């Protein structure tokens, strides 16, 4: 190989490396921002009836079943996050009586647009709303990840959003006193707070603020994911792959005699910017 060939090969190698680095910085997938203040009385107005009617990109809100929510304290904000969670990017939930429009994003329960919200729909919407709760009034960019096919992220997002905060699951459609609002701490939160006590206090503040609510901290999502812990198998979530948890169990840490509850397949794992 002569001098000119070596120079050409070097330039080509540098170009390939530079292109690879640029590709790692490209963010492709679905991001969102938390900031939802949960009002339990308004949450009681949540219905499993069809969210609206219409075809194509514009959905007209079913005000017969969701009109009371719209006029309740924080109701418009709740509906905006419902649209964010349930509808696809490009879809819009429109309120005919007020002219308000709420854009979709994550597409976790698109069937709810024109049909009732079944158990899986309720699980995904509940997990998503909890993941977006921020009673601290601080809107924070998040990378929501999970087994739902509508959630997507690439290596660029993984690189920028590498702080594993928490995993959320439950059912917010149940009546007051029966609602399930659970979260377990991810590796980043457990290590930075630190431990279960610090993580529990942080999440209680994030979900509920200074007031009481029905949120319950389940513990560490998986102790085997924490470097330095022996890994006793005390896993709230029995499944972990591709950076997200699933099959997470309802646990009441306020009652040492309480038995673990059912397991939830619909789980949102939240990553923050590092």
Image (cartoon, helix red, strand yellow):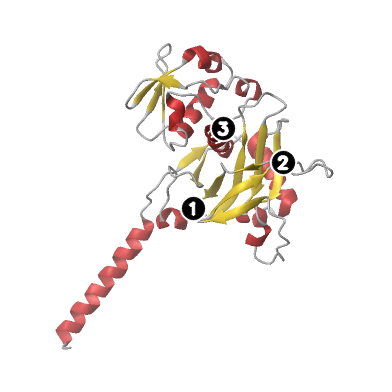
> Is residue 189 placed above or below 85 in the rendered structure?
below
Q: 10 Å neighbourhood of mark 1: few (<14), some, or many (≥20)?
A: many
Q: Are marks 3 and 1 in contact (CB under 8 Å)?
A: no
Q: Between label 2 and label 1, give the one nearer the viewer.
A: 2
Looking at the rendering, in which quadrant would you find the N terminus? bottom left
Question: In this view of the protein, which residue sits in the foreground, 107 or 115?
Answer: 115
State the separation of the CA atoms marked 3 and 2: 16 Å
Q: Is 13 on the left or on the right of 105, as rendered?
A: left
Question: In this view of the protein, which residue sits in the foreground, 216 or 133?
Answer: 216
> Is residue 110 placed above or below 153 in the rendered structure?
above
> Is residue 193 placed above or below 138 in the rendered structure?
below
Q: Secondary structure at mark 3?
A: helix
Question: What's the mark number on residue 261?
Answer: 2
Q: Identify the residue under disc 1.
A: 161
Question: What's the mark number on residue 119?
Answer: 3
Q: Earlier in the sequence, mark 3 or mark 1?
A: 3
* Position in image of residue 151 (x %, y %): 45, 44
């Amino acid at each position: 190989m002569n001098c000119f060939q070596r120079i050409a090969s070097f330039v080509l190698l540098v170009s390939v490396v530079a292109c690879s680095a640029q590709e790692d910085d490209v963010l492709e997938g679905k991001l969102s921002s938390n900031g939802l203040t949960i009002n339990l009385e308004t949450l009681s107005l949540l219905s499993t009836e069809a969210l609206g009617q219409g075809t194509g990109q514009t959905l007209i809100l079913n005000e017969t079943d969701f009109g009371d929510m719209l006029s309740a304290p924080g109701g418009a904000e709740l509906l905006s996050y419902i649209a964010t969670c349930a509808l696809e990017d490009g879809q819009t939930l429109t309120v005919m009586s007020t002219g308000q429009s709420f854009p979709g994003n994550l597409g976790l329960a698109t069937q709810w647009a024109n049909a009732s919200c079944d158990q899986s729909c309720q699980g995904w919407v509940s997990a998503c709303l909890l993941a977006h709760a921020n009673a601290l009034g601080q809107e924070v960019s998040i990378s929501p990840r999970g087994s739902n096919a509508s959630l997507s992220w690439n290596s660029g997002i993984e690189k920028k959003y590498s702080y594993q905060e928490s995993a959320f699951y439950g059912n917010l459609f149940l009546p007051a006193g029966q609602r399930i609002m659970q979260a377990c701490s991810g590796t980043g939160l457990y290590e930075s707070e630190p431990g279960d006590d610090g993580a529990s206090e942080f999440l209680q503040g994030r979900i509920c603020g200074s007031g009481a609510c029905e949120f319950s901290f389940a513990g560490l999502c998986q102790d085997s994911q924490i470097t330095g812990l022996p890994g006793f198998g005390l896993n709230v979530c029995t499944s972990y792959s591709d950076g997200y948890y699933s099959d997470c169990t309802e646990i009441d840490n306020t009652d040492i005699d309480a038995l673990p509850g059912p397991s939830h397949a619909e789980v949102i794992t939240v990553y923050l910017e590092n």
